[in-house]
Amino acid sequence: MPVDHADHILSRSHIHIKGARIHNLKGLSVAIPHNQLVVITGLSGSGKSSLAFDTLFAEGQRRYVESLSTYARQFLGKMEKPPVDFIKGLTPAIAIEQKGQNRHPRSTVGTMTEIYEYLKLLYARIGATYSPISHEQVTKDSVSDIVDYIHTHPQGTRVMILYPLSNTPKTELADVLKIVLAKGFTRVMRQGEVKFIEEMLQDSAITAQEKAPLDVIVDRCVVDKPDSDEAYRIADSIRTAFFEGHGTCLVDVVEQGRRTFSDRFEHDGMTFEEPSVAFFSFGNPYGACKTCEGLGQIMGVDPDKVIPDKTLSVSEGAILPWKGAKMQSWLTPLLANGRSWGFPLNKPYKDLQDKYKEVLWQGCKIFKGLNTFFNYLEANVHQIQYKILLSRYVGKTRCKDCQGTRIRKDAAYVKVGDQSITQLLIKPIDNLVDYFDQLTLTEHQRLIAERLLLEIRSRLSYMQQVGLGYLTLNRLTATLSGGEHQRIKVATALSSTLVGTTYILDEPTIGLHPRDTQRLTDVLFRLKQLGNTVIVVEHEEAVMKVADQLIEIGPEAGTGGGNLVFQGTLEALRQSDQGYTARYLNNIDRIELPTERRKSAYAFRVLGARENNLKDINVEIPLGVMVTITGVSGSGKSTLVNRIIYPALRYWLGLRGDAIGECDKLDGDLCHISHIEFIDQQPIGRSSRSNPATYVKAYDMIRSLFAGQPLAQERRYNAGDFSFNTPGGRCEACQGEGETKIEMQFMADIYLPCEACQGRRFQDQILEVAYAGKNIADVLAMTVDEAMEFFARERVILSLLSPLQEVGLGYMQLGQSANSLSGGEAQRVKLASYLSKDRPDAHTLFVFDEPTTGLHMHDISKLLHAINALIQAGNSVLIIEHNMEVIKCADWVIDLGPEGGERGGEVVFSGTPEELVQVEKSYTGRYLRGKLRGQIM
């Protein structure tokens, strides 16, 4: 059979890739079966993402643009085809990556999943408005309502349609009647009697009748059949009455009585806005809260800074700004007279009733209150002492008008069922699923909302299936982890019900406890069952177990990778010793348990933590050891660490930061913490010009080295000429970016190599300067491993780069853009930055948020070595983690749960890993047992 024909046959059942050479791939060829779940694994930097995203997805994106309009195709000459011989059998591709979270302050889980778009439409179409005074439904009358009312009477009934005549005190009634007569109306009704306007104008006593209300008769008619011409005449008369009566129409049924109708949306003396989509949109000025402008937060006095220790009473000095001798006078009236009218001066602030807390803030007859105090400070900010004092207590606080929901306050008056849209925004998705399953509507509402509810229920269900039932629709996407962001994309992909598509996912198990991984594998399996090809870059064994095929790229990272090490089933991989994955699965290589658990002499405590789902818990954090915070997804780990511990410690250290979550106080051995570093998955720089070399300060030394070369000295170049951040030597066409952005209004923006510098970032004359035969662009293109060899004689540069190698980033290019780094890579670059310091500050608390993101088992051992080096230098380490290899090596474990969301937020266990495995209530303990016994998962 000819080779081309064989390739054609293969491409009908497989995605056939031949000769992939991008980045470190060494002419890799592989056939990926269609409609299968395929896992690509290997060391970090071995070439997994290069194959999945930079080859497969890049080619899929190029082909998609090629199928579009002429406007799109004009960029095809610039869009380079990935360096590969050919790719056959590729279906339309969708990439779901870790990076690319929307950091917009108005982007929420609800907007990202589009659930909120459907909710807005639902409330705009079937929402009922209720008065906050009487709690009665607000309605207005339409023309058809009045026509229907009239036709409820027997045929032959005489009816008059009127509107009330409005007259201002400064206007003569005669003048008003003349205007009415000029409009074509001839009769009015006064006190039940019909009068001709002309006769009234001739009456000399008309002024005496001014106080009597007058109603203008628009039409007199007799009730006929609803489909008669008379019905159209009645409708037209009603419209006229509404117009002339400024929204009021009177229907007088002769000898039976009168009824008033209004087309104004009013009740209890209040005028309400009619529900519309824009009314519920916080991205629209019409619907956004007027106080916070749709952001949910405002700059104001932070109650947690004013009363940081809520276990103290007022008499014990709970109110921090009034502790000084000068400001004590504000509190004196309350201390002197509070007991006489029952204020509990000796009760801890946290135990005070709301009415007494309100007295502290609002004041009373004998006491001015905190709000008056801060208003006084604001009025005197021209005096430096008051300006400084006020700045100590100002921070971002939740908007009081919208309670953080971002939409206008009166949107809460509109309800579907018994819930307003603001109430739904702050409910966990698990609760929303139950609410919409039990929602009962009238037949009319059901017909309108049927399609909307189908979409809402479907999307909520998929969010629940991927393990995100603990999130609220109001949660900012900027606060999501990379794994949460990715799983939302998976849920959105499921709701689209596409078939014949290639889905490429980048470690979707990030942020998932092993207990929750099963849900995700079920979702991936369902995507496959719909008729899609699912390709997952993953290290988690639970995902490998359900995969139809495994592909390992390696065997090493960087230049030592890029080869196809293995392709086959998990069973076949277990029977081989090819590659690191097989060696760790078969227990040939392993991360050993520590020989002993380090003991801590000091600790600090968090008391009364109540933020989000935390249930007033007390937690003790040992210092000088490695502590892991564990628990199922949504159990409260991130809330405890990110919202309480980190901002509270920053405040204690005198640093600015976000508002502290609800808790009573921090105490303990805080004096043994001199500094705090939060190593999360946020990008290492806001600019795309930021890269690993600049972040660890190695690039400063490299620039100085090039500026010292003979040719540079001859041309009088300095270190700044070798910078792509400032004008001088950089390419001004791309301003040192090395690429240009093409804005595509119908899809994601495309980044293409700069035509002026061909992606090298610098002007030609700068590139003529060389060190050991390499110019500055060549150096930026080197991996860390290559740079370590190249700069073997430059000790300072080596000392700055070696930490990158120690944390498993030897494969990374020195000049790789910060925007292209995964969350886990950005996190390890930050760790390397601290390790590269000559003398890291002792007594620093390092906080890690899932540092194993994107790491193979072999790389985790390197990470643990780096973390232990921090502790040996006299620092403390606190880690949010799900990976059992890290948890088993911890000195102390704090397990939260037992479940996620409302059923979580409790301290399930606090102690050593050996003690944790004895706790039946702990899911972490169950999965940890096998690791401590040396068993294979």
Image (spheres, rainbow, N blue to C red):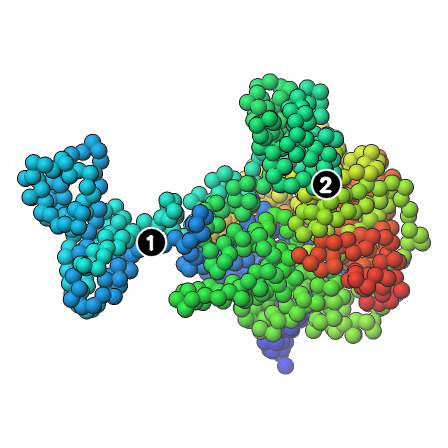
As helix, strand or loop, the secondary structure at mark 2 comes to loop
**Would residue 9 be found to the left or right of residue 624 on screen?**
left
Q: Position of residue 353 (x, y in %)?
A: 65, 41
Quadrant in which the C terminus is drawn: bottom right
Q: Could you tell me the amino acid type at mark 2?
A: Asp
Side of 37 where 572 appears, left or right: right
Front-lying residue, 721 or 500: 500
Question: Which residue bears the numbered disc 2?
Answer: 664
The residue that disc 1 covers is 140
Residue at image location 90% in from the left, 41% down from the top: 601
Q: Residue at x 63, y 65 (%)?
A: 465
Q: Is residue 387 visible?
A: yes
Count the labels in the image.
Answer: 2
Percent across and percent down for residue 579 are 81, 64
Q: Residues within 10 Å of mark 2 (few under 14, many from 20)?
A: many
Q: Judge by depth and name the residue closer to the eye, 639 or 517.
A: 639
Reply above or below: 885 against 833: below
How far apart in space, not on screen, are marks 1 and 2 (Cα)? 49 Å
Mark closer to the chain start, 1 or 2: 1
215 or 761, nearer to the observer:
215
Q: What element does badge 1 sit on?
A: loop
Tell me the kind of residue under disc 1.
Lys
Marker disc for residue 115: none
Residue 663 is situated, as x and y percent measured from the top left of the image, at 71, 42
